[in-house]
Image: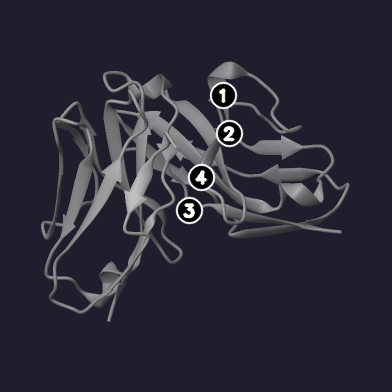
Amino acid sequence: AQRVTQPEKLLSVFKGAPVELKCNYSYSGSPELFWYVQYSRQRLQLLLRHISRESIKGFTADLNKGETSFHLKKPFAQEEDSAMYYCALSGDQKVTFGTGTKLQVIP
Amino acid sequence: DSGVTQTPKHLITATGQRVTLRCSPRSGDLSVYWYQQSLDQGLQFLIQYYNGEERAKGNILERFSAQQFPDLHSELNLSSLELGDSALYFCASSASGTDPNTGELFFGEGSRLTVL
């Protein structure tokens, strides 16, 4: 069975402060992990995937297999980062999402 | 718009009724996924189809069924509706079906079902 845990429902940070959205996973195989984002009144969309090792909109995420984590980080939060963020794991022919974390960036 | 489209956007019905939600995937995508989003439950995976065949099943109730048609659109049928079925139902599609492990999912805007 695969599981994705996002422990924080809401994360509030001030503009310019660092952001870390936590994601832990449980999966017996070799997972592929993603972060999806949903801005207000927009569709859920892919933000980044671990296999690409890329930085999107200043966000990065590193897969830590030892800690089974895939935390999303950004050094300086911007107001436009306010959104709902979902961590997702792809394996066994399906994609499992966490419950999501709402990021609120306070001006 | 060649993205994922879902209809209807909103639906209000009564307990015991049956509804059908429709999804058209992105042009060229063979895989369709259905998710349910209830309050505080995140996105619950229901079912996946690839090129007309069921590929994976999640926490889908027996009262729910789905299918993917030859033109690749999909329908999710919800019957004997209960109050707890009120939720946002998302459809997503992906290009890869045989190996979703490397595929990005493209989501529709969702169908909001309210059961009274």
| Residue A57 point in image, percent of width and height | 73, 33
How packed mark 2 is, by other alpha carbons closer than 10 Å (few <14, some 14-19, many 20 or more), is: many
Q: How far apart in space, not on screen, are marks 4 and 2 (Cα)?
A: 19 Å
Q: Residue at x 45, y 43 (%)?
A: A4
Query: In the image, are marks 3 and 4 on the same chain?
Result: yes
Label annotation for residue A44: 4
Q: How far apart in space, not on screen, are marks 4 and 1 (Cα)?
A: 18 Å
Residue type indicated by callout 3? Thr
Q: Which residue is mark 1?
A: A50
Query: In the image, are marks 4 and 1 on the same chain?
Result: yes
Q: Which is more N-terminal, label 1 or label 4?
A: 4
Q: Which is more N-terminal, label 2 or label 4?
A: 4
Q: Residue A85 vs residue A78: left or right?
A: left
**Chain for disc number 3:** A
Q: Residue at x 62, y 50 (%)?
A: A39
**Chain for disc number 2:** A
Q: Secondary structure at mark 1?
A: helix
| Residue B94 point in image, percent of width and height | 36, 28
